[in-house]
Amino acid sequence: MWNTLRHILDDDELWFSLLRDMTKTFKYQTVDAEDIFNFVNEKIGIDFSYLFDQYLKQVNLPQLDVLLIVQGDSMKFIY
């Protein structure tokens, strides 16, 4: 899940800043998953609840559906 989030952000400076800030903010505290998720959403300014839900609240693995349509010289890729 964290690796997916890092790739979605595609910004290592932001990613490592997030990790540093998270460890500083929650140092010596007992936290739950919602505390971490709220922190990430607030720090980045984007609601990633869909990502956390997919990885942690769904019993089925995510499935990527891919369709390639070739018409003459053109191709359309749908995912």
Image: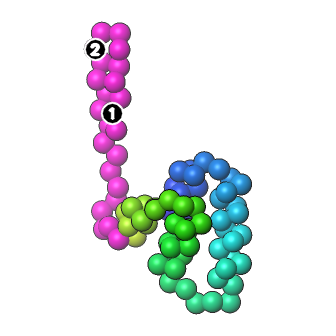
Report the front residue among 35 and 71.
35
Discs 2, 1 touching: Cβ within 8 Å = no
Of the residues shown, which amino acid type is indicated by label 2? Gln
Q: Which residue is mark 2?
A: 71
The chosen color scheme is rainbow
Of the residues shown, which amino acid type is indicated by label 1? Ile
Q: Which residue is mark 1?
A: 78
The total number of labels drawn is 2
Which type of secondary structure does the marked residue at label 2 adopt? strand
The alpha-carbon separation of the residues under discs 2 and 1 comes to 14 Å
Residue visible at 35% across and 19% down in the picture: 75
Q: Residue 17, relative to residue 79: is it above or below?
A: below
Residue visible at 63% across and 89% down in the picture: 29
- Asked if residue 25 lies left or right of residue 46, the reply is right
**Residue 79 occupies quadrant:** top left
Q: Residue 31, relative to residue 71: is it above or below?
A: below
Give the image location of residue 34, x and y in percent.
47, 78
Q: Residue 77, relative to residue 31: is it above or below?
A: above
In reply to whether residue 52 is colored magenta, the answer given is no
Give the image location of residue 16, x and y in percent.
70, 61
**Residue 72 occupies quadrant:** top left
Crowd around label 2: few <14 · some 14–19 · many ≥20 (10 Å): few
Whether residue 28 appears in this view of the structure is yes
Choose the circle earlier in sequence order: 2 or 1.
2
- Image: magenta residue range: 57-79
**Residue 73 occupies quadrant:** top left
Which type of secondary structure does the marked residue at label 1 adopt? strand
Give the image location of residue 66, x and y in percent.
32, 37
